[in-house]
Image (tube, rainbow, N blue to C red):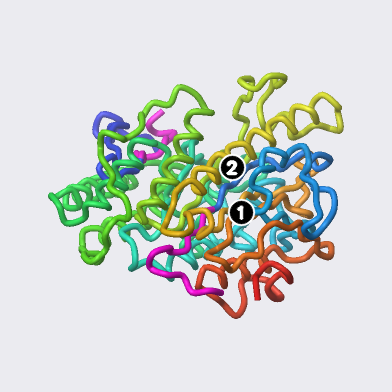
């Protein structure tokens, strides 16, 4: 179907900047258990790294409290008593299908996603959103989803999956991935508005702008070809989560909530990071600000989408993109570069942990009342191996996590068992999560 572009054209500048989300209409072919106290609420963050790891440089030596960090995990040495490395977990429900999408979309859901090129997405609620639902009415923002790369759209023709799956790890239900924010300044401005709820008419403006963008998308859908209809449907499924958030914000449900620290617009970061490294650091800062101010208690961050090939030439000794070196074919130089990229990601993780540890809350600090998970959905990226997932959990979860250990379990222990323990520590226990068989022994205190 051909369309009149003069009538159907919609500006790429029609963005949800008012809602703090750098989202516009998608590219279309047609367009060319200690209780948590009020003083120290428990928080949860998940940092996701695509493409797996160089497994030979990942796993620590030794078990229990007598362990030595590996070369890749060495940047965590000063935080060793605050981390828990877990080994031999896997996500059984992601073992089939393509190399990336079925694993990466399901890293926090432990589900088997539906193979689809279009809008009929099928996954499950993610672990972080179980926590978010538990505390949704206690903070202005139920959760915060961040990234540095725009959502990928269309179908990966090699495997036949929509790329939307590879752009989201947070899912509010089986068909709704949560929109990620990638502009650091917009994130800060959103936190600022949330901390000043009821002051001014910004929520009303956000609602009007959201209605405008959704209306544009619906009108355009009637004029495009079938492939573009699928792209718009994908877009709309992501936008549904924003409708609920804007409505919540404008309802004034948290009138009794007060920020733990004041936020000032003069402290907002740039909206134009100079490079990938600065962009990532700014997003780490945004998670820290969100947790310190108690604007939200749940956050996820994606270092990149599935199959990310971000160039890491800014690292000394690296000459290629991330996905390229993950397919190392056991070549020594690629494995070396792969490990350097993995270590850089751990350095960013350590940066956030130190920042949270420096934020005092009475006699404790934000890190000790948090759980911050670093995860990848693959172990060896070359073989797309879902066994022995690279996982590190930092923080003490308000005193519930028995940190300072390397916990080694039987091969193919469900990663859902880790999530069972984290949910319990957060204060959102469940009888079962996905294919869990129980909480990991030794993870929790008491």
Quarter residue 6 falls in:
top left
- At a point 65% along the width and 71% down the height, the residue shown is 445
Task: Name the foreground residue: 395 vs 168.
Answer: 395
Residue located 74% across and 34% down the image: 326
- Kindly check if marks 1 and 2 are in contact, taking CB atoms under 8 A apart as contact: yes
Residue 349 tag number? 2
The Cα–Cα distance between marks 1 and 2, rounded to whole angstroms, is 9 Å
Residue lying at the far front in this picture: please name it.
363
Report the quarter where the C terminus lies. bottom right
Mark 1 / mark 2, whichever is N-terminal: 2
Element on which disc 1 rests = strand
Q: Look at the image and tell me in which quarter the N terminus lies.
A: top left
Residue 44 falls inside the magenta stretch = yes
Would residue 153 be counted in the magenta stretch? no
- In which image quadrant can residue 269 be found? top left
Q: Residue at x 48, y 58 (%)?
A: 364
Q: Horizontal placement of 434 versus 65: left or right? A: left
Q: Which residues are magenta?
A: 22-45
Which element is circle 2 on?
A: helix
Residue 394 - label: 1
Q: Is residue 36 left or right of residue 90?
A: left
Residue 45 in the image: above or below residue 252: above
* Closer-to-camera residue (111/285): 285
Q: Position of residue 30 (x, y in %)?
A: 40, 34
């Amino acid at each position: 179907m051909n369309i009149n572009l003069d009538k159907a054209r919609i500006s790429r500048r029609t963005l949800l900047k008012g809602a703090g989300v750098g989202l516009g209409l998608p590219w279309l072919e047609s367009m060319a258990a200690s209780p948590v106290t009020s003083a120290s609420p428990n928080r949860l963050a998940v940092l996701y790294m695509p493409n797996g790891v160089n497994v030979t440089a990942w796993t620590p030596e030794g078990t229990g409290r007598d362990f030595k960090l590996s070369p890749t995990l060495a940047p965590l040495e000063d935080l060793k008593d605050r981390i828990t490395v877990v080994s031999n977990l896997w996500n059984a429900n992601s073992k089939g299908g393509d190399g990336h999408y079925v694993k990466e979309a399901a890293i926090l859901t432990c589900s088997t996603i539906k193979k689809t090129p279009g809008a009929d997405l099928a996954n499950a609620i993610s672990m972080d959103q179980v926590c978010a639902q538990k505390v949704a009415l206690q903070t202005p923002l139920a959760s915060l989803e961040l990234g540095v790369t725009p959502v990928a759209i269309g179908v990966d023709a090699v495997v036949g999956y929509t790329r939307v799956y590879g752009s989201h790890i947070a899912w509010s239900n089986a068909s709704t991935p949560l929109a990620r924010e990638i502009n650091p300044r917009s994130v800060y401005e959103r936190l600022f508005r949330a901390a000043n709820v009821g002051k001014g008419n910004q929520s009303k403006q956000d609602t009007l702008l959201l209605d405008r963008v959704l209306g544009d998308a619906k009108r355009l859908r009637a004029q495009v070809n079938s492939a573009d209809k699928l792209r718009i449907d994908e877009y709309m499924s992501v936008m549904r989560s924003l409708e609920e958030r804007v409505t919540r914000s404008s309802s004034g449900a948290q009138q009794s909530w007060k920020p733990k620290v004041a936020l000032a617009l003069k402290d907002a970061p740039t909206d134009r990071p100079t490079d990938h490294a600065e962009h990532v650091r700014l997003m780490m800062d945004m998670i820290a600000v969100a947790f310190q101010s108690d604007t939200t208690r749940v956050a996820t961050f994606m270092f990149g989408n599935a199959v990310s090939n971000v160039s890491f030439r800014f690292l000394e000794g690296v000459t290629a993109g991330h996905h390229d070196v993950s397919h190392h074919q056991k070549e020594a130089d690629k494995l070396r570069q792969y490990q350097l990229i993995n270590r850089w990601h751990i350095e960013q993780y350590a940066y956030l942990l130190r920042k949270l540890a420096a934020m005092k809350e009475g006699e404790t600090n934000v890190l000790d009342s948090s759980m911050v998970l670093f995860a990848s959905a693959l172990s060896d990226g070359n073989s797309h191996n879902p066994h022995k997932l690279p996982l590190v959990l930092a923080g003490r979860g308000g005193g519930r996590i028995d940190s300072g250990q390397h916990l080694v379990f039987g091969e193919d222990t469900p990663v859902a068992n880790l999530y069972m323990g984290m949910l319990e520590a957060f204060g959102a226990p469940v009888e079962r999560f996905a294919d869990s068989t129980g909480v990991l022994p030794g993870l929790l205190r008491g």
